[in-house]
Amino acid sequence: MTKIILLVLLWNTDDSITHNIVMVDECPPIEVVAVQFQPMQDAGVIKSWSAFCQGLFFDFPENPKEEKEEKKEEINA
C-alpha cells in the first residue's frame, strides 16, 4: 500500500521545531504550500519553514490472521 504524505516543519521564534504530517492525494506545488507559510515567516511569527512530500510504501500481509495461523502450525509441527 502506498500513501503520499506532506510533512511541514516550522522553525519557531523560540528555536523549537514543530511539524505537521498530512496524507494527500498528490503532492501540492510548492507555491500552494508557500502561500500558507511564507506570510508567517515574513511577519516574524516563525523563523523559517520547510515542506517535503513523498510517497511511502507500507508492506502489510494480505491476510494477517492467516499468517499467524501458519506460524502456529509451523511451531506445532
Image (cartoon, rainbow, N blue to C red):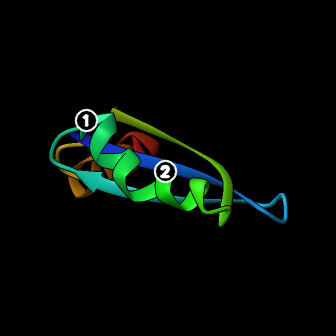
Q: Residues within 10 Å of mark 1 (few under 14, many from 20)?
A: few
Q: Residues within 10 Å of mark 2 (few under 14, many from 20)?
A: some
Report which quarter residue 45 is drawn in: bottom right
Task: Residue at 15%, 47% (x, y): give it.
Answer: 25
Which one is nearer the viewer's eye here, 77 or 16? Answer: 16
Report which quarter residue 56 is drawn in: top left
**Residue type at the position of mark 1:** Pro
Report which quarter residue 16 is drawn in: bottom right
Quarter of the image with the N terminus is top left
Q: Nearer the viewer, mark 2 or mark 1?
A: 2
Relative to 18, say whether 66 is above or below. Answer: above
Q: Position of residue 22 (x, y in %)?
A: 35, 58
Q: Position of residue 55 (x, y in %)?
A: 30, 33
Task: Residue at 60%, 62% (x, y): give it.
Answer: 43
Q: Alpha carbon of mark 2 to alpha carbon of mark 1: how far?
A: 14 Å
Disc 1 is placed on an element classified as: loop
Q: Position of residue 23 (x, y in %)?
A: 29, 54
Q: Position of residue 66 (x, y in %)?
A: 21, 51
Give the labeled residue for mark 2: 38
Per the rendering, the mark at residue 56 is none
**Residue type at the position of mark 2:** Gln
Per the rendering, the mark at residue 29 is 1
